[in-house]
Amino acid sequence: MGEKIYTIKDLSKITEIKITTIRKYEVDFDLKIPRNEMGHRVYSESEVQIYRKIKAMKERGAGTELIREIIVKSADVMEQKEKAMELITIDRLTGAELKEVMLSQIADILQERDKMYLDRIEKLEKKMEHELESQREKICDQMKSENEKLIKYIAISREEESKKDSFWERIFGRSKKG
């Protein structure tokens, strides 16, 4: 069985808030109140709690702006708005409400997509860094190997050069060896 649903009269009796004040609070605090098939406001226990909080803050002397700031940041109100938006059918949405629903959903989708792209970019950057480091190590090893070969070649060439007779020594018959 579902959650208990109250009419605006029931809410007024439960919270001891006048019906006109309930409607005013809906506007003042941007509350999203679901409606039934006939367009009448319907309230669940979460809306009752929100109205009780508003009334308690008003009784303590809080102004509309302060209450609005607190209410907007309240997890209960955010959860209530989400539930209310789920209950509202598209055929009963005003243009502004439909726009708000669509913008909210688009914003959520874009945030998810951005997060997904950022995760992909981060993974690719890590992969590229790893590949670059691997390539750098390979190139360094190749250069070291080639340098060692070159040093050996130069040493052997010098050694062979020192053992050979020069062009003039071969012509005139003088030898370093003998």
Image (cartoon, rainbow, N blue to C red):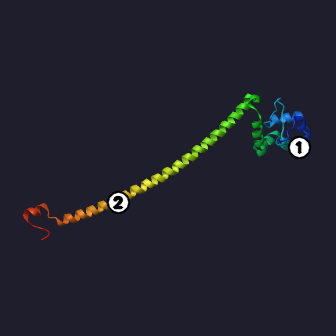
Tell which circle, 2 or 1, labels the residue nearer the N-terminal end. 1
Task: Single out the residue that lies furthest toward the front.
Answer: 1
Between circles 2 and 1, the one closer to the viewer is: 2
At label 2, the amino acid type is Ser
For residue 126, side relative to residue 170 (left or right): right
Task: Report how far apart the C-alphas of labels 2 and 1 lie in the structure.
Answer: 84 Å
For residue 126, side relative to residue 166 (left or right): right
Split into 4 quadrants, where in the image is the C terminus? bottom left
Place residue 69 in its image quadrant. Answer: top right
At label 1, the amino acid type is Glu
Q: Is residue 105 above or below residue 121?
A: above
Q: Position of residue 18 (x, y in %)?
A: 90, 36
Using the image as rendered, state which of residue 155 and residue 60 is in the foreground: 155
Place residue 159 in its image quadrant. Answer: bottom left
Instruction: Read off the residue under disc 1.
Output: 59
Q: Secondary structure at mark 1?
A: helix
Q: Residue at x 84, y 31 (%)?
A: 40
Task: Single out the residue that lies furthest toward the left.
Answer: 172
Q: Residue at x 61, y 41 (%)?
A: 113
* Marking on residue 109: none
Q: Is residue 153 above or below residue 34?
A: below
Q: Residue at x 8, y 65 (%)?
A: 173
Q: Position of residue 92 (x, y in %)?
A: 77, 29
Split into 4 quadrants, where in the image is the N terminus? top right
Task: Single out the residue that lies furthest toward the bottom.
Answer: 178
Instruction: Read off the residue under disc 2.
Output: 145
Q: Position of residue 166 (x, y in %)?
A: 14, 62
Using the image as rendered, state which of residue 150 and residue 38 is in the foreground: 38
For residue 104, side relative to residue 31 (left or right): left
